[in-house]
């Protein structure tokens, strides 16, 4: 697809906001205090070493674009904290009304700027689930069709970013309508879909041809960021494909040990862009009954419990095991792709300091021991 | 907009049968024709209160109404037990796969049930006896806590026992003086020569502990793990493999089940919990 160039973001974002037809454009905004660094304290407890680490509170959130705002829109270096699922199925939504069904609200077109490769890969996972033949979720489809995706390159990976370990890149290859790469004197814009092409054609006065030097610079930055990611994750190498590693260590007690510090805050599943569990509940309104759909978390105690009280995943370790098996084994077997994209949001969000990378590392050690024993 | 998966079909409870002190059967009439295969389940909504999964206990031949047998075990089932005739409810489904009846043809069908587990089995039983000549035999072994706790008593103690080709034996965990039958859990009436295990399938439905020990016994008899069909009742909420609550390993019980062979799920831990 074609590649174009803009020297300034503002006229471009104004045009996007304009073309959203009364819908909204969401852009990243830095929030919180303190730089995103980690302080680590290490101490021994029972049989393991616990590293308590605190991510800085600074991160990005999505806000509605305001063309008249004085501060320009920031080009986010990494993913925004909010997972993409928030745009496609909200924390709580109306799933059905009865006895008389109501016509669902019409979804207006909307656009999101600043999504990263990890976000687009998580979107692929969500699409597999909610666009699945025979069981298409009508609410998801309605929003998905109206979403205009403007992704961008990462240029300074976060400490918790480990996408490179899971075949991710700091720049998107597909799945976007437009992708933006920042270079020294402007932005390289890559067109990724028919929708994106139509936008560029409609607003051709905004775009120029990109110079060879701009493309070269973009590629240089990309390679540099990829290299940095590789370095950051040099210690996270697996001797066996993760799927096989996890299957072979299914009986491992690593999960029980790692889950010891879990406080069931469920932050990991909230911020996870691929976690999509929900529960349905019924409410009574003045003149109708409603079935509501709300995000749920498999890390919650009563999640798998049945009416009689039986619960196959009563123990925290079993819940952590199921969560990770789902991500790396079950989803892969069913849909052909891994359900963890290595965005590291769960690592930053955890109140109980469960680090998915540490769990994988330990399983890798374990499989090494199993092989030696054999 | 695509059809809404979450929208229940408006339905009404037209009759209620008291089966046992804790179990009632409800005759539910959906406002439009409703087809299902025996073993598939539905989500029954009590408007404004909640929703729960049940396998209809009636024959799939009747597409105008269905019977749903409900034990009072939790919040929603407790509220359903307070419902009167005429109560409006919602039905979603049917979900999952039914029993693979065609695979049973020519074989002995060994049905082991316990407590309210007889509900899905009744639907299967009615389907099998419709074409009883297609099967080598239909052998049923049912258990209940006390004689009072049996459901479908009239048919169970009468008509069903008289059907040619059907062999039914019952047992109770505890009984008073009037009970003439066996006393002991259901596994105490399972005998290796009940069916020819080399040419039979077993269908098990009941409380988890009963299913666990029955499966052990069936394996001892020489049943292959792929010939033992288990009705797994997990926390099915959405019904179409998305919400995640009912997962056993990689399987969504709602979509891939609710009937599984032991072979399919035996590798996963805590399947009976």
Image (cartoon, coloured by chain):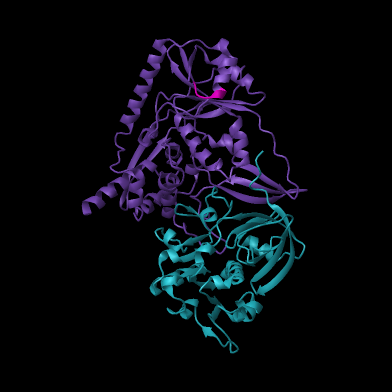
Chain colours: A purple, B cyan
Residue A152 visible in the picture: yes
Q: Is residue B51 magenta?
A: no
- Tell me the quarter of the picture where residue A196 sits: top right
Q: Residue at 70% x, 71% y: name it.
A: B17
- Tell me the quarter of the picture where residue A236 sits: top left
Q: Residue at 46% x, 80% y: name it.
A: B188
The image position of residue A207, as x and y in percent, is 53, 12
Q: Residue at 35% x, 48% y: name it.
A: A246
The image position of residue A312, as x and y in percent, is 47, 59
Q: Nearer the viewer, residue A234 or B94?
A: B94
Q: Nearer the viewer, residue A342 or B97?
A: B97
Residue at the outermost bottom position: B177
The image position of residue B44, as x and y in percent, is 65, 58
Residue A70 visible in the picture: no
- Tell me the quarter of the picture where residue A132 sits: top right
The image position of residue B195, as x and y in percent, is 46, 76
- Vertical comparison of A242 with B132: above or below: above
Q: Give the left or right position of residue B19, taking residue B245 as reference.
A: right
- Vertical comparison of A304 with B23: above or below: above
Number of numbered markers: 0
Q: Quadrant of the N terminus of chain B?
A: top right
The residues colored magenta run A191-195
């Amino acid at each position: 697809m074609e590649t174009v160039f803009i020297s300034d973001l503002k006229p471009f974002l104004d045009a996007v906001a304009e073309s959203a037809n009364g819908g909204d454009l969401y852009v990243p905004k830095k929030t919180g205090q303190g730089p995103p660094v980690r302080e680590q304290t290490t101490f021994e407890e029972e049989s393991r070493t616990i590293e308590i680490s605190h991510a800085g509170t600074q991160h990005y959130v999505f806000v509605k674009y305001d063309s008249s705002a004085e501060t320009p829109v920031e080009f986010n270096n990494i993913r925004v904290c909010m997972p993409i699922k928030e745009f496609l199925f909200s924390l709580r939504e109306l799933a059905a009304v009865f006895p008389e069904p109501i016509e669902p609200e019409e979804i207006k077109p909307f656009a999101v700027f600043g999504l990263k490769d990890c976000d687009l890969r998580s979107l692929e996972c969500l699409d597999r689930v909610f666009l699945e033949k025979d069981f298409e979720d009508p609410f998801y489809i309605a929003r998905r069709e109206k979403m205009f995706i403007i992704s961008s390159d990462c240029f300074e990976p976060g400490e918790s970013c480990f996408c490179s370990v899971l075949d991710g890149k700091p720049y998107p290859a597909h799945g976007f309508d437009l992708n933006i790469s920042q270079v020294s004197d402007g932005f390289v814009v890559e067109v990724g879909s028919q929708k994106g092409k139509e936008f560029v054609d409609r607003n051709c006065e905004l775009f120029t041809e990109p110079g060879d030097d701009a493309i070269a610079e973009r590629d240089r930055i990309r390679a540099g960021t990829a290299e940095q990611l590789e370095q950051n994750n040099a210690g996270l190498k697996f001797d066996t494909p993760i799927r096989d590693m996890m299957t072979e260590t299914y009986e491992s007690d690593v999960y029980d040990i790692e889950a010891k510090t879990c406080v069931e805050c469920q932050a990991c599943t909230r911020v996870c862009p691929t976690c999509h569990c929900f529960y349905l509940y019924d409410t009574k309104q003045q003149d109708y009954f409603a079935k509501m759909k709300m995000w749920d978390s498999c890390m919650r105690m009563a999640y798998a419990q049945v009416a009689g009280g039986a619960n196959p995943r009563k123990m925290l370790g079993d819940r952590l095991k199921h969560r990770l098996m789902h991500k790396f084994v079950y989803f892969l077997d069913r849909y052909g792709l891994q359900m963890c994209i290595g965005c590291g949001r769960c690592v930053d969000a955890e109140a109980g300091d469960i680090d998915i990378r540490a769990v994988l590392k330990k399983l890798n050690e374990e499989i090494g021991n199993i092989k030696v024993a054999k | 907009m695509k059809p809404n998966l979450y929208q229940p079909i408006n339905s009404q409870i037209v009759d209620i049968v008291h089966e046992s002190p804790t179990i009632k059967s409800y005759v539910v009439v959906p406002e439009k024709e409703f087809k299902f295969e025996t073993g598939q389940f539905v989500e029954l909504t009590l408007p404004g209160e909640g929703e729960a999964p049940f396998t209809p206990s009636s024959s799939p031949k009747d597409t105008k109404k269905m019977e749903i047998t409900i034990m009072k075990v939790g919040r929603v089932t407790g509220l359903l037990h307070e419902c009167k005739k005429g109560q409006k409810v919602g039905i979603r489904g049917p979900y999952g796969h039914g029993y693979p009846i065609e695979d049973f043809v020519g074989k002995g069908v060994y049905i082991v049930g316990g407590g309210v587990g007889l509900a899905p089995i009744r639907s299967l039983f009615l389907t099998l006896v419709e074409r009883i000549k297609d099967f080598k035999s239909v052998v049923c072994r049912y258990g209940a806590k006390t004689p009072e706790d049996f459901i479908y008593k009239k048919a169970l103690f009468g008509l069903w026992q008289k059907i040619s080709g059907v062999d039914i034996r019952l047992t109770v965990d505890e009984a008073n003086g009037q009970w003439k039958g066996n006393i002991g859990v259901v596994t105490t009436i399972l005998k290796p020569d009940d069916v020819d295990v080399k040419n039979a399938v077993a269908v098990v439905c009941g409380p988890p502990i009963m299913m666990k020990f029955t499966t052990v016994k069936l394996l001892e008899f020489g049943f292959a793990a792929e010939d033992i069909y288990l009705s797994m009742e997990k926390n099915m909420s959405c019904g179409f493999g998305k919400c995640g609550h009912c997962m056993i390993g990689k399987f969504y019980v709602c979509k891939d089940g609710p009937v599984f062979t032991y072979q399919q799920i035996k590798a996963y831990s805590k399947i009976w919990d």
